Image (cartoon, rainbow, N blue to C red):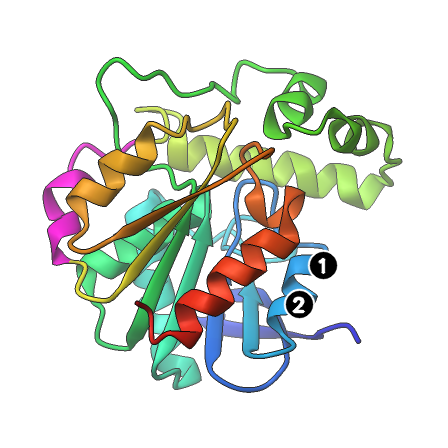
Amino acid sequence: MGPTVTTETVAGCTFRLSRAGSGSPILFLHGAGGAAVWLPFMEALAERHELLVPEHPGFGASDTPDWLDNVGDLAYFYLDVIDRLGLEGLHLVGASLGGWIAAELAVRSCARLKSLTLVAPAGIHVKGVRKGDVFMWSADETARRLFHNQELAEAMIAAPQNEAAQMARMKNSLALAKLAWHPRFYNPDLEKWLHRVSVPTLLIWGEHDQVIPPAYGPAFARLIPGARLEIVGDCGHLPHVEQPVAFVSLVNRFIGGGGT
């Protein structure tokens, strides 16, 4: 069963929202690749929870509003979305760029959150540990660096793309550049305020992440009170895609244990 897809308007921005399942709500914030496809990990999470997957302003089928300048704008936008949809006891999950947005949201307000899961999030800088530079990589190189399993990378490279998909990819790249070009995937102020995260937090990292290296995991864990770090083996930057069974198991155990 696929999701129900609707368009919603918040803060003057019309955005695409995919929704499936029932139970405790999970809001999943996607990474730089967008959220045009309902993936196996989404289907699995929706078996136990109500899963909501919005497409960020500036990405895919969503509007690009005049007010979109930085990741902080998206954090405030999603606080408005949470209010508008009346979500309470929300489990917030964000991956990569989406993890950065989720962290920025949580330092502003955890009032409606029950837990926070960050999957290889961007947003901070660790001295001496260099991130991968997706802006300098070709599309093929990016695919190969996203995954530890190179069969998945080659399948992504070989997948045909129609004109609509190509246009969405270009739109996503422009939005990503606006949000993360300078400084690269980094808000110098974020680490100062991560101590404000007041809900149980799970950090998930791929063992072989070449985009945001695993050394960033302990750094985030030190900055967020009580945060727990889990490393997923045989995995690159996208644990939810490359190791969906392990990823869903970690999230379900974390949420099922009350976020502990």
Residue at 46% from the left image edge and 19% from the top image edge? 132
Q: Residues within 10 Å of mark 1 (few under 14, many from 20)?
A: some
Residue in the picture at 64% in, 63% down: 42
Residue located beneath label 1 in the image: 40
State which region is magenta.
Answer: 186-196
Q: Is residue 48 visible?
A: yes
Q: Are marks 1 and 2 in contact (CB under 8 Å)?
A: yes
What's the magenta bit mostly, secondary-structure-wise? helix
Visible residue check, residue 13: no
Q: Residue at x 23, y 67 (%)?
A: 199
Disc 2 on helix, strand or loop? helix
Q: Which of the pair 253/170 is nearer the observer? A: 253
CA distance for labels 1 and 2: 6 Å
Q: Is residue 53 magenta?
A: no
Position of residue 68 measured from the top left corner of the image (x, y, whole percent): 39, 49
Identify residue type, mark 2: Ala
**Quick one: quadrant of the N terminus?**
bottom right
Counting from the top left corner in percent of width and height, residue 141 is at 66, 17
Q: Amino acid at mark 1?
A: Pro
Locate residue 104 relative to residue 164 in the image: left or right: left
Query: Within 10 angstroms of label 2, few (less than 14), some, or many (20 or more) residues?
Result: some
82 vs 131, nearest the viewer:
131
List x then y, in percent, for residue 80: 34, 72
Q: Which mark is residue 44?
A: 2
Q: Is residue 78 left or right of residue 209?
A: left
Query: Which quarter of the figure is the C terminus placed in?
Result: bottom left
Vertical placement of 198 versus 138: above or below?
below
> Of helix, strand and loop, which one carries label 1?
helix
Q: Quadrant of residue 215?
A: top left
Residue 18, disc: none
Q: Is residue 87 above or below residue 69?
A: below
Name the quadrant containing residue 186. top left
